[in-house]
């Protein structure tokens, strides 16, 4: 996959962190809802996607500088790198 070769963040990941709980850790604090979940591959936090009202995963990536998330959705096996806008399947 060309995108994978172009992104050092994705190629550096050897073991994908799974979601510890199937919730957005920020939305549950405020009682908000979400659409899909993503798990940060740097710190392991699970947050909501860009289709969700709060977009916590994107906000986390921007604030923390953690580049890569994995889909936390059952049956989805992909990683996404924010700074490189790159996808990779695993
Ligand atoms: Zn990258
Ligand atoms: Zn959220
Ligand atoms: Zn993180």
Image (cartoon, helix red, strand yellow):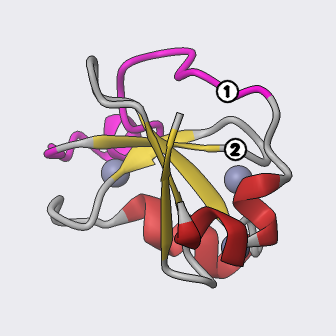
Question: 18 left or right of 25?
Answer: right
| Depth check, front residue: 44 or 17 | 17
Q: Is residue 31 magenta?
A: yes
Q: CA distance from mark 1 to mark 2?
A: 6 Å
Q: Is residue 1 above or below residue 23?
A: below
Q: Is residue 31 above or below residue 64?
A: above
Which numbered tag is attached to residue 41? 2
Residue 15: image quadrant is top right
Find disc 1 in the rendering and name its residue: 17
User: Up-down: is 89 above or below 80?
Assistant: above
Out of 46 and 6, give the one closest to the viewer: 6
Is there CB contact under 8 Å for labels 1 and 2?
Answer: yes
Within-10-Å neighbours for mark 1: few <14, some 14–19, many 20+: some
**Left or right: 45 in relation to 38:** right
Residue that extends furthest to the front in the rendered view of this protein:
1
Residue 64 lies, in percent from the top left, at: 74, 71
Q: N-terminal of the two: label 1 or label 2?
A: 1
Residue 26 screen position, x and y as percent: 44, 46
Per the picture, the main secondary structure of the magenta-coloured stretch is loop
Q: Which residues are magenta?
A: 15-35
How far across and down, in percent of the image, does residue 40 sit?
Answer: 62, 47
């Amino acid at each position: 996959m060309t995108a994978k070769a172009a992104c050092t963040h994705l190629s550096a990941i050897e073991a994908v962190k799974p979601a510890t709980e199937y919730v957005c850790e920020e939305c549950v604090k405020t009682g908000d809802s979400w659409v899909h979940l993503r798990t940060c591959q740097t710190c392991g936090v699970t947050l909501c996607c860009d289709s969700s009202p709060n977009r916590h995963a994107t906000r986390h990536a921007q604030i923390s500088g953690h580049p890569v998330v994995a889909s936390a959705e059952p049956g989805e096996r992909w990683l996404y790198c924010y700074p490189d806008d790159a996808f990779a399947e695993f």
